[in-house]
Amino acid sequence: MARPWHKLVLIAILAMVSATFVTVPAQAATVDLVLTRTSPADPITGDKVTFTGTAPASLAGATVALQRRVGKTADWVKAAATKVTTDGTYALSGVATGVGLNQWRVTATKNGSVHTSKVAKTTVYAWYYLSQLDTVDDDSFGSDSVAVGGKTYSKSVMNSYDSALANDGNIVWGEWNLSYRCKTLNTWVGVADSSESGFGADFTIYVDGAETDLGTKTLGPATATVLDVSTRLRLRLELQGTPDTQKNDLDGYGVYGNAKVLCSGKP
């Protein structure tokens, strides 16, 4: 049978053990920092994203850290830091990373109190070359590095063999899915320097069936083309030899030089 003083000692020991394992809840951050993005909401990966902000007067001189999260679940990482000015303002910037969602916030700690801002969001875009994407379907269409007007376009799409446009009425083409993730097509159109004299090609682009006629190109410098492909699914590039090319059986290549699309994710 335990003596009374033994019970008292046991109770004291159990109380000490319980106190040792009590979890102290983390201090909740106070959302009193204001973060305002001053650069576009749709940067290209690698672009600088700039912010200004305001803080309570009590945080003058404190360090605010800009944090970035890629996607929805990745860890927050420090992107930049600066001090709050005497008038309660600050300015800093970070680099857009990856493709798709970037989240941003600022935090500051002073006298043991944690301060933070609401989360700001940006959608990050990146360029994807058509030559590096799979086609949905194609007819005599391929990719290569090719010179047009003395300039080399290393990631071009074009007819896959030089006599493909010499056949009467023949149209060659390639189709890609944009998956509603892209907003801009950028390319240089022209005829390869290796083409026979007199060779010409007609260039046509279809975006979800809507036609853009780029006209006829012959030997000479390529022409820059930029096309809006926002909220579209299917991209189709076509080439057809001109009547003289087909009549005279001329060999050559119609080139969509360095054709690429700007997208918020791989199409």
Image (cartoon, rainbow, N blue to C red):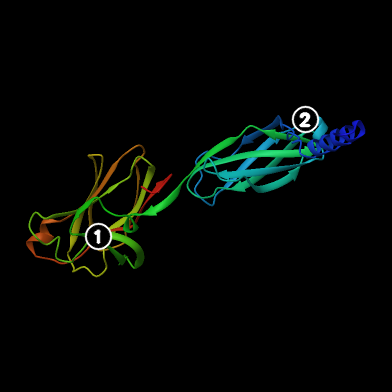
Outermost residue, front side:
1
Looking at the picture, how far across and down is residue 20, in whole percent?
A: 80, 40
**Is residue 6 visible in this depiction of the protein?**
yes
**Is residue 86 visible in this depiction of the protein?**
no
Q: Is residue 177 left or right of residue 124?
A: left
Q: Residue at x 38, y 42 (%)?
A: 181
Callout 2 crowding tier (Cα within 10 Å): few <14, some 14–19, many ≥20: some
Q: Is residue 148 left or right of residue 124?
A: left
User: Disc 1 marks which residue?
Assistant: 158
User: Disc 2 marks which residue?
Assistant: 56
- Image quadrant of residue 207? top left
Amino acid type at mark 1: Met
- Please identify the quadrant where the N terminus is shown: top right
How far separated are the C-alphas under marks 2 and 1? 60 Å
Looking at the picture, how far across and down is residue 65, in whole percent?
A: 70, 43
Q: What element carries label 2?
A: loop
Query: Which circle, 2 or 1, is nearer the viewer?
Result: 2
Q: Give whichever of discs 2 and 1 has the lower sequence position.
A: 2
Frontmost residue, 24 versus 166: 24
Q: Which residue is drawn at 35% across and 62% down?
A: 155
Looking at the picture, how far across and down is residue 264, in whole percent?
A: 43, 44
Looking at the picture, how far across and down is residue 153, in whole percent?
A: 35, 63
Badge number at residue 258: none
Frontmost residue, 119 versus 131: 119
- Image quadrant of residue 149? bottom left
User: Is residue 246 placed above or below 111 in the rendered structure?
Assistant: below
Frontmost residue, 42 versus 67: 67
Q: In this view, does 118 lie to the left or right of 20?
A: left
Q: Residue at x 25, y 39 (%)?
A: 208
Q: Is mark 1 on a helix, strand or loop?
A: strand
Callout 1 crowding tier (Cα within 10 Å): few <14, some 14–19, many ≥20: many
